[in-house]
Image: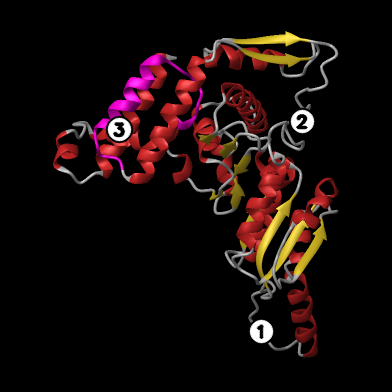
């Protein structure tokens, strides 16, 4: 754990050095270009709050003493030092859980990884428990569920452009439509209830209407050879998709076939829950999804588990971290979480911010 954290400290120092124009920073530049690029990619690692060691405090202080930080970086680093001191000075952390608690094995593994004196008290009468579904349900200590936070991210994206919006949904996600917020946009909600993605896409995008109209015109003068390219409807700007994971892979190509690049496609986070390899994400290329950058790195470097599993374990990790911060007496913290950026405040719920990302090959390149 100490070795892992020291690696993050080196990454942080390298990034600060690269960002500074002072003579001191120039003398401290890493000779290896490969090392520099690796440092940039892993900069946020020290804000993961995933492992703790006394040596880290000295490393953080050296960063401050280097005088290469801007005001925001200096403030964040001082906060990090203060929080680490509180976390490391705590003699014992206690978690009270039911004996049959779901994710018990995974929780024990996370506790071991943290390297802190955490004890679990198994109590059958304990009222508090970890939710069975860490994605759809609000976890204790958080302001809202992961799914609700994903909807919030989509709402921020659609309010930037108030043109007409098409929402394609399956009945499992029909309730999310009511959570969408838009200004004066024309919201058109269509349930996917077909087995033919091509026919459905042609219909909702208006291509089949264009073809029928052309046929009527052609029938009026069958001897005239008219060139025709069916066009999708022009009153739409964005297409938001709420479907089951297995339906996305066919729906998005079908929409692109008929609509081309005329629309901005926004997927719900459920679109990727069945993915087990980062290469599979290319099926969603050029579409947008609420997806954390930390999660991007984990999917890229690990394979075998589904993305749904990564999200669930990430949410569990974040729940455990909130318990630690709360018991350590931490007042506030900025955390680079797996599911998103977390803003922790004592005596308040933790806010999760999930960025919208455009899926591309570059996003998952090594």
Query: Which of the two discs, 1 and 2, sits closer to the camera?
Result: 2
Residue tagged 2: 133
Q: x, y (%) of residue 233? A: 70, 74
Does residue 314 sit above or below 182 in this rendering?
above
Answer whether residue 203 is visible to the viewer in this image: no
From the viewer's side, name the closer residue of 46 and 120: 120
Q: Is residue 88 left or right of residue 283?
A: left
Give the labeled residue for mark 1: 226
Alpha carbon of mark 1 to alpha carbon of mark 2: how far?
56 Å
Q: Is residue 179 above or below residue 364?
A: below
Alpha carbons under labels 2 and 3: distance apart: 41 Å
Mark nearer the viewer, 1 or 3: 3
Q: Residue at x 30, y 31 (%)?
A: 63
Element at label 2: loop
Q: In this picture, which residue range is highlighted in magenta?
A: 46-69
Q: Position of residue 28 (x, y in %)?
A: 18, 33
Of the two numbered discs 2 and 3 in the rendering, the one whose residue sits closer to the viewer: 3
User: Of label 1 and label 2, which has the lower sequence position?
Assistant: 2
Quadrant location, the N terminus: top left
Going by the image, does 44 lie left or right of 158? left
User: Element under label 3?
Assistant: helix
Quick check: marks 1 and 3 in contact, CB under 8 Å? no
The one of 42 and 72 positioned closer to us in this rendering = 72
Front-most of residues 181 and 90: 90
Point out residue 21 in the picture as x, y percentages from the top left corner.
20, 46
User: Mark 3 = which residue?
Assistant: 64
Q: How is the image coloured?
A: secondary structure
Residue drawn at point x = 59 percent, y = 17 percent: 110
Secondary structure under the numbered disc 1 in the rendered image: loop
């Amino acid at each position: 754990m100490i070795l892992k954290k020291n690696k993050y400290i080196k990454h942080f120092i390298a990034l600060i050095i690269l960002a500074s124009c002072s003579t001191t920073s120039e003398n401290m530049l890493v000779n290896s270009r490969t090392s520099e690029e690796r440092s940039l990619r892993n900069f946020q690692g020290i804000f993961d709050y995933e492992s703790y060691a006394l040596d880290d405090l000295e490393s953080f202080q050296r960063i401050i003493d280097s005088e290469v930080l801007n005001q925001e970086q200096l403030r964040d680093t001082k906060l990090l030092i203060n929080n680490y001191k509180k976390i490391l000075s705590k003699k014992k952390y206690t978690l009270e859980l039911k004996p049959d608690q779901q994710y018990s094995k995974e929780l024990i593994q996370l506790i071991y990884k943290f390297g802190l004196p955490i004890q679990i008290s198994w109590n059958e009468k304990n009222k508090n428990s970890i939710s069975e579904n860490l994605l759809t349900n609000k976890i204790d200590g958080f302001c809202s569920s992961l799914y609700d936070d994903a909807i919030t991210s989509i709402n921020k994206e659609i309010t930037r452009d108030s043109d007409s919006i098409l929402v394609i949904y399956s009945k499992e996600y029909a309730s999310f439509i009511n959570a969408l917020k838009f200004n004066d946009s024309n919201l058109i909600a269509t349930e996917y209830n077909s087995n033919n993605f091509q026919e459905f896409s042609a219909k909702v995008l208006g291509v089949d209407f264009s073809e029928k109209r052309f046929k009527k015109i052609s029938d009026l003068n069958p001897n005239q050879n008219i060139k025709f390219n069916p066009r999708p409807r022009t009153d739409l700007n964005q297409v938001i998709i709420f479907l089951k994971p297995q339906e996305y892979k066919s729906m998005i190509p079908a929409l692109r076939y008929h609509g081309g690049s005329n629309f901005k496609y926004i997927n719900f986070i459920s679109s990727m829950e069945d993915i087990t390899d980062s290469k599979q994400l290319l099926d969603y290329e050029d579409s947008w999804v609420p997806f954390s950058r930390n999660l991007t790195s984990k999917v890229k470097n690990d394979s075998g588990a589904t993305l749904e599993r990564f999200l669930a374990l990430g949410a569990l990790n974040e729940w455990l971290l909130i318990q630690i911060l709360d018991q350590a007496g931490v007042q506030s913290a900025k955390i680079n979480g797996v599911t998103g950026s977390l803003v922790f405040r004592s005596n308040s719920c933790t806010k999760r911010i999930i960025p919208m990302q455009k899926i591309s090959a570059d996003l998952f390149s090594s």
